[in-house]
Image (cartoon, rainbow, N blue to C red):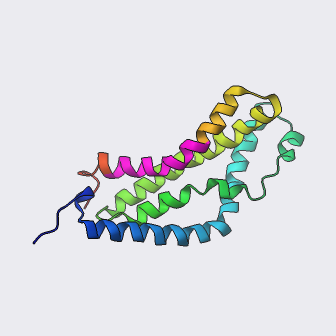
Amino acid sequence: MKEKELILGLSEKQILVFLLEFIVVSTIFLGVWYYIGKFYQGVVFFFAKHILLALDYTPLQISAVNLSGAYMANFNLVPLVALAIATPRLAMKRRIEMLAIGISLLFLLHVLDLVAHFPMYFHGSGIAQFVVYSIGVGGVALPFIIWAVFVFLFSKRYTH
């Protein structure tokens, strides 16, 4: 008897394998992220610093913000990479496109998040606080939204 196809044309067993692979890849990449995340955060801070200087924040104000360990706040790259690797029946070209677009979007989000903290902390800006809190919540969902767009909306075009 043929198994019923559910999501992505996968059987229950295939979905379970996908979820287990996603968990394993996420765990491995999270361990790797612990070591490489600080370099990524350095790039985020480099761009944010130039934006902050253009917004007339002083080097003293910028240096007053302690970013040690902040790279763990950008861990939402972990599930995006894991989903790109673990998703079955997704062509390599589409995986690369998902990562290129997804990492770029998350990078912009991370820079915006860092920049928005400054008017929130230094000026008590309610708009900046809304942006920071929205990114805090939305940033967790964004890797899954990016994945869903690539897999479900483009499923006919983006599979083998």
Please tell me how many numbered marks the rendered image carries.
Answer: 0
Q: Is residue 69 above or below residue 62?
A: below
Q: Nearer the viewer, residue 120 or 89?
A: 120
User: Is the residue 58 above or below the residue 100 in the image?
Assistant: above
The quadrant in which residue 3 appears is: bottom left
Task: From the top left corner, tell me how far across and down residue 119 is, in percent.
Answer: 76, 32
Q: Determine which quarter of the picture holds residue 11.
A: bottom left
The x and y percentages for residue 146 are 43, 48
Q: Position of residue 20 (x, y in %)?
A: 41, 70
Instruction: Confirm whether the magenta stretch covers residue 71.
Output: no
Magenta region: 136-151
Magenta-drawn stretch, dominant element (helix, strand or loop): helix
Q: Please identify the quarter of the rendering in which residue 21 is found.
A: bottom left
119 vs 82: above or below: above
Q: Residue at x 63, y 46 (%)?
A: 110
Report if residue 140 lies within the magenta region: yes
Residue 59 % position (x, y): 86, 41
